[in-house]
Amino acid sequence: MVKKRQGGEEPVPEIREVAFSAPAGRPAGVEVMTLAELRSRADACQLSTPHRPGFHHLLLLERGRLVHSLDFREHVLAPGDLLWSRPGQVQHFGDLTGAAGRLVLFEAGFLDPATAAAARIEDWYGPPVRRPEGAAARGVAEALQQLHTEFGALGGLPLEIHRDVLRHLLAVLVLRAAHPGGAATGSGGDGTCAASTAYLRFRDAVERGFTRSRRVADYARSLGYAPRTLSRATEAAAGVGAKEFIDRRVALEAKRLLAHGDQSAARIADRLGFADATNFSKFFQRQTGTTPIAFRGAVRGGAG
């Protein structure tokens, strides 16, 4: 994707956006494949180049080793690991040679709302890699196997019924993937349900508004909570206070823009709601330990 700068300057390359595209003759919204099929169908250079898909990736590694980068963090997957990347996250694959497993691609709207809520599929801040054990691992593997088998079973059912079966099987998989340990964690404290609701509402509000405000008080006022309530809820759910949660989200977006575009620090500062480039640079260095220019050079040098 290319975006032109104002004032007739040179075009600015941005992160490549990837939309979901259903295979011909298949139901829209979901696709299941092996990693071997991915290797044979996809351009290795495109897979290894940072891109931003507009759909979910749910990958279960069965054999071998796979390195996968997600929002500037490298994850080394071993057999049994389950990777879940969400729409809008910047990712790229490492060398797929020798890695065996299954990959599910699906759009958020393919699932029914109740399942999407129960699995928290929009939780970009959830752990990207999980490792189910024992019965939980068998449940995930069996659900994925059933989904893959049904996806390949063309002609057995009318297309509408086939799509409904896929939707139900995917619901089983994402619910097992979202709760791989069985029992829920984080319960037992007084007011846990209220804290969880406060966190989820705050998280979603930050995702919508981090370029406009970095003040906890602004979010507290719009959501109807006290700032202290938001901080306690965020600390319990994410392990950091509300202000740090906001700042980390802003820093992540800054990294994305610096790594995959040619906009100046001043333009990025304006895009992220900073008064000027100096304030942005101080913020970025405080969050990351390096300057925006040094970060861009290190990332691009490493990629080269």
Image: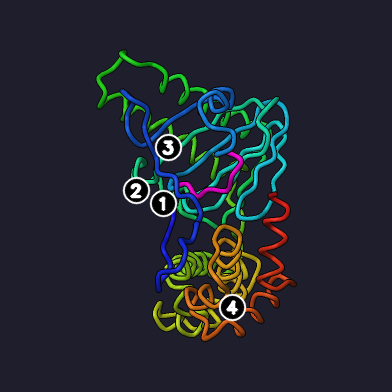
Please tell me which residue is depicted at 50% across the width and 26% down the height of the picture: 41
Which amino acid does the dot numbered 2 rest on? Pro
Spot occupied by residue 223 in the image (x, y as percentages of width and height): 40, 77
Residue type marked 3: Ala
Left or right: 86, with 99 as reference point: left
- Marks 1 and 4, how far apart at CA: 26 Å
Query: Disc 2 designates what residue?
Result: 113
- Under circle 3, the secondary element is helix
- Against 227, residue 22 (above or below) is above
The answer to which quarter of the image holds residue 231 is: bottom right
Q: Are marks 1 and 2 in contact (CB under 8 Å)?
A: yes
Return the residue nearer the eye: 186 or 222. Answer: 222
- Residue 287 lies in quadrant: bottom right
Q: Nearer the viewer, mark 1 or mark 4?
A: 4
Q: Do the residues labelled 4 and 2 touch (CB within 8 Å)?
A: no
Give how far apart the Cα atoms at labels 1 and 3 are. Answer: 11 Å
Determine the secondary structure under disc 2: helix
State the CA–CA distance, disc 4 to disc 2: 30 Å
Query: Which class describes the residues within 10 Å of circle 1: few (<14), some (14-19), or many (20+)?
Result: few
Q: Indicate which disc, 2 or 3, sits on the residue closer to the N terminus.
A: 2
Mark 2 vs mark 3, CA separation in Å: 10 Å
Q: Is residue 302 above or below residue 222?
A: above
| Observer able to see residue 65 | yes
- On the image, the x and y values in percent for residue 93 come to 62, 40
Q: Tell me, for residue 171, which label it has, or none.
A: 3
Dot in front, 4 or 2: 4
Q: Distance between the residues labelled 4 and 3?
A: 34 Å
Magenta segment, which residues?
Answer: 47-53
Q: Which mark is residue 243?
A: 4
| Mark 2 nearby-residue class (10 Å; few <14, some 14–19, many ≥20) | few
Is 11 situated left or right of 179 in this image? Answer: left
